[in-house]
């Protein structure tokens, strides 16, 4: 009996070790707000660190599942998108839920693939089924404003949406990034092979392609390798590159 219990104990320890080892080394979505607080999606939870990289707090909601992305454009109303449960949660800068989760189906959206903040105070939501980007006001009420992406991108998976300096960027896996101005007019597409999401650093879009980091320089419309010791898509805070490897915040 003692031998069986000891064997069971060793099996449990091995499972825990493997689980922890798998978690460490995985790149996590990361973003900084305008106060240099760092927001991370790590499996089932959202974690926030202050500008000294000390943990402020974390948030999770087992009923909603794992968060897909966050948008910290407004540091007092951080958007957390749960694609699996088609829900959005708004967090304050103390990483506390402000109100009840927003069920997107209650807003008339059948299949929300991506959600992001707008400089106008509202939200952009990409509905792939209807192939349209809808704008909702700050109270999450529909405004009737919509953008229709180029149908030539419909054969690829939409991976990320982000507004930056009044321009809306929508990425499609292995195909490129669509751009729209503040009036919804289409700008020139960015023809890059992108794996998932991207970030903005010093006038460039930093992204991964086939597991390697690249930067697309917006001023010159050129793409080149991104020279950094980071193995994950980083952010830049106070002249330092940061990424989260699934176990800890790494500063380089």
Image (cartoon, rainbow, N blue to C red):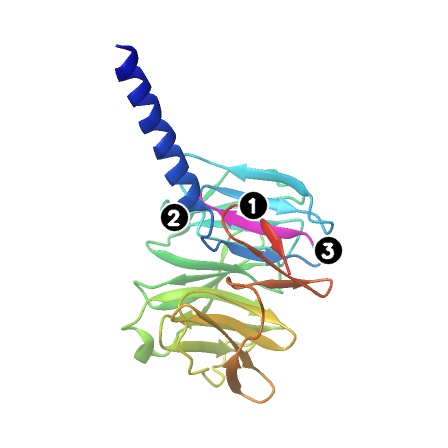
The boundaries of the magenta stretch are 37-43
Query: Looking at the image, which is closer to me, 69 or 25?
Result: 25
Packing grade of label 2 (10 A; few <14, some 14-19, many >=20) is many
Residue picked out by circle 3 = 35
Which numbered dot is residue 90?
A: 1
Residue picked out by circle 2 = 86
Which numbered dot is residue 133?
A: none
Relative to 211, 48 lies left or right: right
Q: Could you tell me which secondary element the residue under label 2 belongs to?
A: loop
Question: Spatial distance from mark 2 to mark 1, Cα to Cα?
Answer: 14 Å
In this view, the mark in front (3 or 1):
3
Q: Does label 2 or label 3 sit earlier along the sequence?
A: 3
Does 117 appear in magenta? no
Packing grade of label 1 (10 A; few <14, some 14-19, many >=20) is many
Residue at screen point 39% across, 77% down: 193
Instruction: Kindly indicate whether the residue at mark 3 contacts the one at mark 2 (C-beta within 8 angstroms).
Output: no
Quarter placement of the N terminus: top left
């Amino acid at each position: 009996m003692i031998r069986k219990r000891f064997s069971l104990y060793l099996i449990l320890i091995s499972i825990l070790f493997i689980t922890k080892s798998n978690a460490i080394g995985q790149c996590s979505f990361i973003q900084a707000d305008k106060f240099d607080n760092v927001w991370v999606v790590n499996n089932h939870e959202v974690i926030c660190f202050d500008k000294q990289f000390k943990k402020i707090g974390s948030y999770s909601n087992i009923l909603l599942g794992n968060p897909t992305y966050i948008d910290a454009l407004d540091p007092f109303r951080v958007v957390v998108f749960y694609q699996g449960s088609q829900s959005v949660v708004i967090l304050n800068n103390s990483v506390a839920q402000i109100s009840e989760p927003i069920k997107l189906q209650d807003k008339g959206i059948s299949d929300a693939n991506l959600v992001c903040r707008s400089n106008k105070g509202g939200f952009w939501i990409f509905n792939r089924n209807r192939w349209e980007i809808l704008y909702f006001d700050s109270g999450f009420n529909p405004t009737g404003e919509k953008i229709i992406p180029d149908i030539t991108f419909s054969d690829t998976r939409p991976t990320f949406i982000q507004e930056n300096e009044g321009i809306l960027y929508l990425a499609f896996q292995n195909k490129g990034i669509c751009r729209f101005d503040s009036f919804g007019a289409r700008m020139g597409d960015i023809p890059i092979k992108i794996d998932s999401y991207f970030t903005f650093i010093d006038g460039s879009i930093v992204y991964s392609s086939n597991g390697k980091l690249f930067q697309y320089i917006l001023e010159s419309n050129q793409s080149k390798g991104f020279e950094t010791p980071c193995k994950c898509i980083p952010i830049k805070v106070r002249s330092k590159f940061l990424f989260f490897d699934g176990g800890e915040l790494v500063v380089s």
